[in-house]
Amino acid sequence: KPMMRRAEFPSGAAALFAKPGLIDRKAKRRPKVELNEDQKKEIKEAFDLFDTDRSGSIDYHELKVAMRALGFEVKKEEVKRIMQDVDRDATGLVDFSEFLTIMTAKYAERDPGEEVHKAFKLFDDDNAGKITMRNLKRIAKELGENIPEEELQAMIEEFDLDQDGAINEEEFVNIMKQTSVY
């Protein structure tokens, strides 16, 4: 019996096959991630920072701290597994090219939606579900930026689609999409 093409499936069957977990995980390959120059520079700086003896390699503990410094919450077991995967000669060390490979894979695993949500939460420190003038002032101060209140107000007004005087998460996502962060 010939195989049915996707367009020939009854509509309910197509929905069933789209359910998570029914497709072989290995068949769902992530697209190859190309790091931009800023990301590569950030990875190199983290590697150099934790390669304290300037040997050109880092050990298990330095790897774990470097990954966390780059914003990846990794558990001890995961770092051990990564070390076993990349440390083929069993030296207990990872060189920069191996570190770059590890970090490229970690960047590929990032969920942009989750990253934007985390960024929104950093602004919305009072958990109001909105970024207010007070939130923007705090962030500007923390970043050492001296931005006049009028300019901050103009930022809110530009992106405040529902005109409630604040930026909600949906509006924040739109900002991130416009800046190609998301």
Image (cartoon, rainbow, N blue to C red):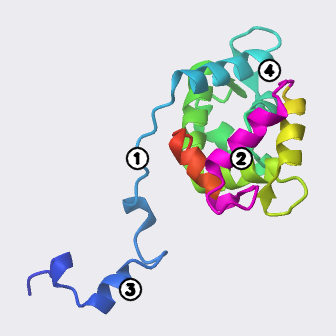
Residue identifier under label 3: 16
> Tag 1 or tag 4, which sits nearer the N-term?
1
Q: Is residue 130 visible?
A: yes
Q: Is residue 58 left or right of residue 34?
A: right
**CA distance for labels 3 and 1:** 24 Å
> Tag 2 or tag 3, which sits nearer the N-term?
3
Residue identifier under label 4: 50
Label 1's element?
Answer: loop
Expressed as whole percent of the image width and height from the top left, the position of residue 93 reads: 71, 25
Q: Amino acid at mark 2?
A: Ile
Label 4's element?
Answer: helix
> Tag 2 or tag 4, which sits nearer the N-term?
4
Disc 3 vs disc 4: which is toward the camera?
A: 3
> Tag 1 or tag 3, which sits nearer the N-term?
3
Expressed as whole percent of the image width and height from the top left, the position of residue 113 reads: 60, 56
Please check the rendered image and state whether residue 151 is part of the magenta-colored stretch, yes or no: yes
Q: Is residue 135 left or right of residue 33?
A: right
Up-down relation of residue 122 to residue 93 (above or below): below
* Residue at position x 81%, y 10% in the image: 53
- Considering every residue shown, the one lying at the far top of the view is 54
Disc 4 vs disc 1: which is toward the camera?
A: 1
Disc 4 vs disc 2: which is toward the camera?
A: 2
Residue 81: assigned label: none
Q: Amino acid at mark 4?
A: Phe
Residue identifier under label 2: 156
In this rendered view, identify the residue nearer to me: 44 or 179. 179
**CA distance for labels 1 and 2:** 35 Å
Residue identifier under label 1: 31
| Region of the chain picked out in magenta, as a range | 144-170
* Residue at position x 23%, y 91% in the image: 10
* Residue at position x 69%, y 55% in the image: 117
